[in-house]
Image (spheres, helix red, strand yellow):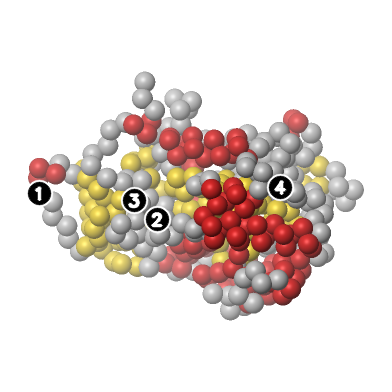
Amino acid sequence: MKPTHEREEPMFTLISGGTVYAPEKLGRRDLLIAGGVIARIAERIELPAEFKPRVIRAKGKIVTPGMVDLHVHLLGGGGEAGPWSRTPEITLSKIVCAGVTTVVGLLGTDDVSRRPETLLAKAMQLEQEGISAWIYTGSYQLPPPTITGSVRKDIALIPKVVGVGEIAVSDHRSSQPSFDELCRIAAEARVGGMLGGKAGLVHLHMGAGPRGLEPIRRMVKETEIPIGQFLPTHVNRTRELMEDAVAFAAMGGHIDITATGRGLSFRPTSVEAVRSALEAGVPIERITLSSDSNGSMPIFDPQGRVVRLGVGEIQCLFEDWQSLTAAGIPLEESLKVVTANPARRVGLFERKGSLAVGKDADLLILDRHGDLDSVFAMGRLMLSRGELRVKGTFEE
Ligand SMILES: [Zn+2]
């Protein structure tokens, strides 16, 4: 039996006549995929018959980059109400059916039963199954769990490690890190990133505590670490935190909004959050949207007891992106928050996050209603006319 990634695909695929958003609107274009990368984008592409291309007619359809989700609990998470509340691992098919072709995995509260080594192996599995995956080292806690014994070494030496996170601040589930501890870990990530030619991103989970983004602002003020090294997430958890995040973005910071989909109780919703940031003058390039998929979504009572449990769904990312477009944000702009911007934050923009010659052939075809028609990952047709073609190893 062959692993799914070794099954045969044609060398050439021609997607003809679709309206291409790269994310910027290129208009009606043919797009040629050759051996997993985008080989050409032009008004008309003719191929010699002996190339035997697979031709996909996309007239009346929209072609976009595959989505990049920089915050996914690949191994599941949770456990905050006891072992029964541990959330399940993600599967390949859920990722593909959400239009996501690149994920960045992380650990949350539970770094006792889930470890960075396991997370790395899960990312490798997903990549062999067909999509692209990276990870952050660390977890909510400081000192962080690592693979080599140091955040700096993990980022510098392990190809799949792009940063550290999600480190919890202003949250009752955090390790209540001191300011010095936070500075030290940010410096480790920065230097590791420099040595490894990576982003070295410091990805911070924001809780609902009154300190808000103050610890990050203080690091920017009192250390030499540039503001672009930090990416706070869940900034739409409360209205106060969102206002704080808009102020941070006005200083030049980047902010990550969590998809609220159908169930998450965060207010503002992701659509309200993006709109309020744009209305306050934050450039869209500073905003990303992520799913928090497979993390637990516990609701606590005033005594800090869990009263209800949910689990994050990666599908929410696609739905919230559609809602952004429905709310009047032009497609070439709304696309940035789920493609080019997250690819830049984690240092993958040379390969991911936009449609251009030489980049990985990760792309989506949307039908005239905006629904997902097809998904290509590294040039492989994973989903065709709404039907999954490639499943994870144990999903048959
Ligand atoms: Zn989180």
Element marked by disc 3: loop
Disc 3: residue Cβ within 8 A of ligand 1's nearest atom: no
User: Counting residues from the N terminus, which is met first, the one under dot 2 or under dot 1?
Assistant: 1
* Nearest-to-viewer mark from 2 and 1: 2
Q: Counting other residues with Cα less than 10 Å from the Cα at mark 3, is it few (<14), some (14-19), or many (20 or more)?
A: many
* Nearest-to-viewer mark from 4 and 3: 4
User: Counting residues from the N terminus, which is met first, the one under dot 4 or under dot 3?
Assistant: 4
Q: Are marks 2 and 1 in contact (CB under 8 Å)?
A: no
Residue beneath label 2, please? 351
Position of residue 292 relative to residue 281, above or below, is: above
Position of residue 19 relative to residue 1, above or below, is: below
Q: Counting other residues with Cα less than 10 Å from the Cα at mark 2, is it few (<14), some (14-19), or many (20 or more)?
A: some
3D distance between C-alphas at marks 3 and 2: 9 Å
Element marked by disc 4: loop
Residue beneath label 4, please? 144
Element marked by disc 2: loop
Which amino acid type is marked by label 2? Arg
Which amino acid type is marked by label 3? Ala
Residue beneath label 3, please? 361
Which amino acid type is marked by label 4? Pro
Q: With 273 as the anchor, is 141 left or right in this view? A: right
